Image: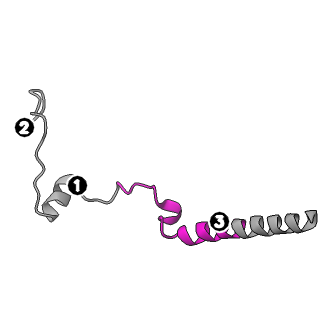
C-alpha cells in the first residue's frame, strides 16, 4: 500500500505544479508583461498640455515665492 500512496502523491504534485505553471504563463500577458512597472515620463507632453487636452486647468497649490520670476 505504500507504493500506491507515493504514486498518488507524485501525481498530485505533478498536476499541481503544471497548474501553477499554466496559471503563471497565461496570466503574464494580462498583468502587463515585462515592462508593466516602467514609467513613461518622456512622452513630450507637459502637465499643462495634458490637463488642457481633457479640459482641466492646473493650479498651483502653493503661492509663488518672491524670488521666482513672473
Q: Nearer the viewer, residue 38 or 30?
A: 30
Tell which circle, 1 or 2, labels the residue nearer the N-terminal end. Answer: 1
Please state if 27 lies on the left or on the right of 62 as rendered.
right
Q: Which residues, given as a range, are shown in magenta? A: 17-41
Q: Quadrant of residue 18?
A: bottom right
In three-dimensional space, the C-alpha distance between marks 1 and 3, rounded to whole angstroms, equals 43 Å
Q: Are marks 1 and 3 in contact (CB under 8 Å)?
A: no
- Was residue 26 drawn as part of the magenta stretch in this picture? yes
Residue 12 in picture, x, y percent from top left = 76, 67
Q: Residue at x 35, y 54 (%)?
A: 41
Give the answer, above or below, for where 7 lies relative to 48. below
Q: Nearer the viewer, mark 1 or mark 2?
A: 1
Secondary structure of the residue carrying tag 2 is loop
Where does residue 66 sit, x and y in percent of width and height? 8, 27
Q: Which mark is residue 46?
A: 1
Up the image or down, 10 lies above or below 40; here it is below
Q: Secondary structure at mark 3?
A: helix
Dot 3 alpha-carbon crowd within 10 angstroms: few under 14, some 14 to 19, many 20 or more: few
Q: Residue at x 10, y 46 (%)?
A: 59
Q: Hey, which quadrant is residue 44 in on the image?
A: bottom left
Residue of label 2: 70
Could you say which disc has been placed on residue 12 in the image? none
Amino acid at each position: 500500500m505504500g507504493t500506491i500512496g507515493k504514486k498518488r502523491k507524485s501525481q498530485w504534485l505533478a498536476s499541481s505544479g503544471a497548474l501553477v505553471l499554466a496559471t503563471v504563463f497565461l496570466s503574464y500577458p494580462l498583468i502587463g508583461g515585462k515592462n508593466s512597472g516602467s514609467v513613461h515620463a518622456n512622452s513630450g507632453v507637459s502637465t499643462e498640455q495634458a490637463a488642457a487636452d481633457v479640459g482641466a486647468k492646473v493650479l498651483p497649490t502653493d503661492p509663488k515665492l518672491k524670488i521666482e520670476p513672473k
